Image (cartoon, rainbow, N blue to C red):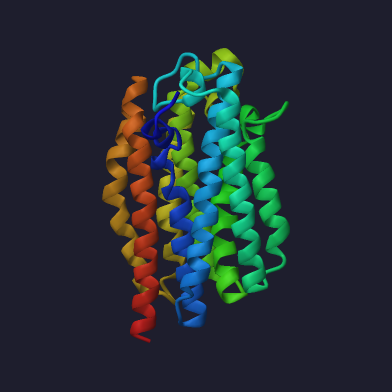
Amino acid sequence: MATIAQWVAGARLRTLPIVIAPVIIGTAAAVDITGKLAWPEALLALVVGLLLQIGVNYSNDYSDGIRGTDDVRVGPLRLTGSGLAKPATVRNAAFACFGFAGIVGAFLVVYTASWPLLLVGVAAIFAAWGYTGGKNPYGYRGLGEVFVFIFFGLVATLGTTYTQAHQLTLPAYIGAVGTGLIATALLMANNIRDIPTDKEVGKMTLAVRLGDPAARISYVMMLTLAILLPLVMVSTHLWMWLILLTVPLGVAPSWTVLRRHEPGALIPVLKQTGIINLAYAALFTVAIVMELALA
């Protein structure tokens, strides 16, 4: 019987910055449009994102566990693969998270009259399960990074902005792509670590398909592009130069990914990449606020 602490570990809290960051950026982009902060909408969007991400983590734990993908691995605790929890219990925990995310998301859509997002929300839940669940999971075909970029980058950020401002602008799009790239880099680092074991069980992640050297380079390229993208807005948002303050944060994880090849060495990179995403979102927000304050 898994303890509460083990269930919390299984939720993989270090991955949560990939849903916190887009809500922060999406809210900042909305403030740039409306000039005011919509707290209720922002908090509801955050709850939806957190529930979906935890649901994805439990779903991945269940699906990989029953397939034997996690039988031999290096990394954080897995409830199903370790035998600490029954597979059905982990699966039901994932479904519960998806269900609550759907309820809160539906309320957000009704509350803000953002009707186009209703179908997007349904698609996000099905995509969350289909990542490693079902008979033909797309995460096993190298499409996991695409899912993360679309739903935890574009959808999460732009959806947050739309529910608060009912329109989308360049900062929203740039921020969505940037945070999506960092979230994708986090998944890439995780999958680089698992290349040997994933190959054995036929889990053809993008890291496996690219091969070890190219996958490592792609991590650095994603971070670099994410940091440089906001600079295209400096003509209208001069304070976006602040984004460059994330560069020092990216040095250590990039060096680790490029130079360290023992599997356990990449575990800290997940947390470091999450911190980069949060810092990126915070600096993006400060840039928006400073521009408005000095306008």
What residue is at 30 percent from the left and 35 percent from the top? 255
Residue 22 image offset from top left, x and y in percent: 48, 57
- 113 relative position to 9: left or right: right
Query: Relative to 119, does residue 137 appear above or below in the rendering?
Result: above
Q: Quadrant of the C terminus?
A: bottom left
In the picture as drawn, the residue positioned furthest to the bottom comes out as 295
Residue 108 image offset from top left, x and y in percent: 61, 65
Of residue 62 and residue 185, the one placed in the foreground of this image is 62
Residue 280 image offset from top left, x and y in percent: 37, 57
Query: Relative to 87, does residue 123 appear above or below in the rendering?
Result: below
Residue 205 seen from this side = no
Of residue 47 and residue 29, the one placed in the foreground of this image is 47
Query: Relative to 69, does residue 76 appear above or below in the rendering?
Result: below
- 118 relative position to 166: left or right: right
Residue 195 image offset from top left, x and y in percent: 49, 21
Query: Relative to 197, does residue 59 appear above or below in the rendering?
Result: below
Of residue 20 and residue 270, the one placed in the foreground of this image is 20
Quarter of the figure with residue 55: top right
What residue is at 36 percent from the left and 34 percent from the top? 5
Residue 163 seen from this side = yes
Quarter of the figure with residue 148: top right
- 189 relative position to 143: left or right: left
